[in-house]
């Protein structure tokens, strides 16, 4: 049997929230609840004196930072986060946004590094092509040119051995699984 509090809670949500019966509030709410509001005038006064404009502005700046991060505009996001932090240092949204900003900075740094590495690789390839002696026409000393191409592509037998071992392991595991399934199927048939 449900207790009195769970029944009251169920009725509250069913009648007040789900059915929007405002009259049920008076029926279900304890009379002491009215006194609770009257007993806390100091708290009501303190809450009334709070200037919420800075908190609102901080939340707006945090939302701008969130939008800037979505657009991958790291500098604008950083600026908005700093503004939001200056307005309201206790804004909890800033903690998450600072983590996202750090991740975005790391990603941008990695992308910049990759782009510069790619650019330097292209420059190196262009430099090698410029430094390479011209090749002889076909039919004359074509063999040395082919030999130099083979020298640029080193072969790694260890890599091939590892691939062969992995393939052998996969084949063995597959054979064991097949044998197990076949054995169980034969047991079911018998």
Image (tube, grey):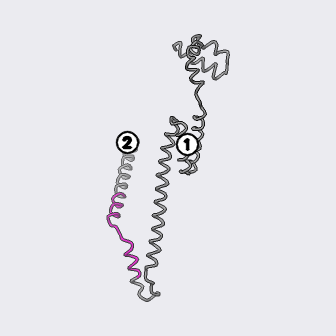
Instruction: Determine which residue is flagged by label 1.
Output: 83
Residue at image location 37% in from the left, 58% down from the top: 167
Towards the viewer: 133 or 157 = 133
Image vertical order of residue 91 relative to residue 42, above or below: below
The residue tagged with tag 1: helix, strand or loop?
A: helix
Towards the viewer: 159 or 183 = 159
Relative placement, left or right, of 24 versus 121 is: right
Q: Which mark is residue 187?
A: 2
157 inside magenta stretch: yes
53 inside magenta stretch: no
Towards the viewer: 190 or 149 = 149
Residue at image location 65% in from the left, 15% down from the top: 24
The earlier-in-sequence mark between 2 and 1 is: 1
Q: What secondary structure is the stretch in magenta mostly built from?
A: helix
The residue tagged with tag 2: helix, strand or loop?
A: helix
Residue at image location 60% in from the left, 35% down from the top: 56
């Amino acid at each position: 049997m449900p207790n009195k509090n769970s029944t009251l809670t169920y009725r509250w949500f069913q009648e007040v929230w789900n059915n929007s019966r405002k009259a049920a509030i008076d029926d279900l709410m304890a009379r002491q609840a009215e006194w609770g509001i009257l007993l806390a005038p100091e708290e009501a006064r303190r809450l009334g004196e709070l200037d919420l404009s800075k908190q609102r502005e901080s939340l707006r700046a945090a939302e701008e930072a969130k939008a800037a991060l979505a657009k991958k505009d790291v500098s604008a996001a950083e600026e908005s986060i700093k503004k939001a932090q200056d307005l309201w240092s206790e804004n909890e949204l800033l903690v998450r946004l600072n983590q996202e900003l750090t991740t975005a900075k790391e990603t941008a740094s990695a992308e910049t590094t990759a782009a510069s590495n790619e650019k330097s690789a292209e420059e190196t390839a262009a430099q090698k092509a410029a430094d390479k002696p011209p090749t002889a026409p076909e039919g004359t000393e074509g063999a040395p040119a082919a030999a130099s191409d083979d020298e640029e592509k080193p072969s790694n037998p260890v890599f091939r051995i590892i691939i062969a071992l992995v393939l052998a392991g996969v084949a063995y595991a597959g054979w064991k699984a097949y044998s197990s399934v076949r054995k169980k199927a034969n047991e079911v048939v018998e």
